[in-house]
Amino acid sequence: MAGSIYDHLLSNGVTRRSFLKFCSATAATLGLSSSMVPRIAEALEKKERPSVVWLHYSECTGDSESVLRASKPSIAQVILDIVSLEYHETIMAPSGHAAEKSLHDIITKKKGKYIAVYEGAVPTKDGGIYCFIGGHTAIDSCKQVAAGAMANIAVGNCACFGGIAAASPNPTGCKGIQDIIGGTVLNIPGCPMNPENFTAVIVHLLTFGSLPALDSLGRPLFAFGKLIHNNCERRPHFDQGQFVRQWGDMGHRLGWCLYEMGCKGPMAFQNCPTIRWNEGTSWPVQAGHPCIACATPNNWDDAYPFYKRLEGLPGVGWQANADKIGLGIAVGTAAAVAAHGAIRAAKQRKVPKDDGEGHE
Ligand code: SF4
């Protein structure tokens, strides 16, 4: 079909083989069986690229960077190619009144047909004076855009839950998008969000005509339904009581568990261990850094200090926000963590002595 997503990909040098590879990878990210790959391919062959309005509020543009940065034209390129990014304050050509006109044209002429993507928290204190775009507060801006959107998607922890902008003492009264516009907002948290989860959400919307199943925090279950701790490649070391105790020690070099160094994987839900980052290259824990629960509400307050060992059960806030199934896993895991801590303390298991050369 002329003008379809597939045509656009072909005209931009994407081969049929790469296209089908992308469909397979996206089906896997969505947790769908390989039998759904033809259906995804068919949808992308027939559907036109959806218009996207991407707004920025109190944030660092890390989520845009996450989507835009790629070492080679692969998945990140495809993400940009399957949508028509018609308004994005950081990368679009128009500025000033021309930019304002672009936004106005989209939300009036494409009412009910565009996807609104929000990056950043919304300052609400003192009438919202701490974030103005084109003479409008962020509060008015997102309400206006959300009213005509076919879907509202918040990307990054700030847009989803307030993020670092809302961390104590939250001087500008920042809130997540859902708290401002109400209704259904699909949250793809993370600091930044993983662009492959964003692509998978768009592909799901195009293929099935609906958003994927969400948890109680508005996060897609395919991406946020599993505990990081249960899928972590360092988990066997946790089970064996093999912990990193100091940065650069022997355990750290051998890829042991980062729990003692403050890892919040036992309380965090996201698919980082399976889809990873930078085109599947790695993820923070694989690279040797503890998880900071960046896709969890209030992580900048509740998971802080990031390098302090998680003590016993997760705090009440974490549990109150977890799904029922997640709660069970989290409590079970936390109990296991506590038990491990006790066993480990009793055994006083030692990390092999480091001679500085990587030998015991
Ligand atoms: S505590 Fe962290 S590093 Fe250790 S197994 Fe769990 S998620 Fe992985």
Image (cartoon, rainbow, N blue to C red):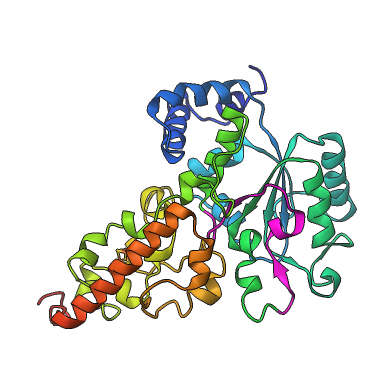
Q: Is residue 9 left or right of residue 110?
A: left
Does the magenta portion include 116?
A: no
Question: Where on the picture, by quarter, is residue 56?
Answer: bottom right
Give left or right: position of 245 versus 275: left
- Whether residue 283 is visible, yes or no, is no
Q: Position of residue 155 (x, y in %)?
A: 61, 54
User: Which residue ends up furthest to the left in the rendered image?
Assistant: 360
Residue 227, given in percent of the width and then of the height, sits at 39, 56
Q: State left or right for residue 11 relative to residue 111.
A: left
- Residue displayed at 78% across by 69% down: 124
Q: Is residue 187 magenta?
A: yes
**Residue drawn 48% across the image and 78% down it:** 304
x, y percent for residue 308? 39, 80
Q: Do we see residue 45 in this rendering?
A: yes
Residue 306 position (above or below residue 134): below
Q: Residue at 39% of width from left, 27% of height from top?
A: 34
Taking depth in this image into account, of 298 and 274 the one nearest to the observer is: 298
Quadrant of the displayed image that contains ligand 1: bottom left
Q: Is residue 165 above or below residue 33?
A: below
Region of the chain picked out in magenta, as a range: 171-193
Place of residue 265 in the rendered image (x, y in percent of width and height, measured from the top left): 38, 64
Q: Quadrant of the N terminus?
A: top right
Q: Quick one: 232 or 81, which is closer to the camera?
A: 232
Task: Give the camera-side residue of 27 and 358.
Answer: 27
Residue 111 position (above or below residue 11): below
Point out the image quarter for the C terminus: bottom left
Residue at the image position 66 percent from the left and 81 percent from the top:
169
Residue 120 relative to residue 66: left or right: right
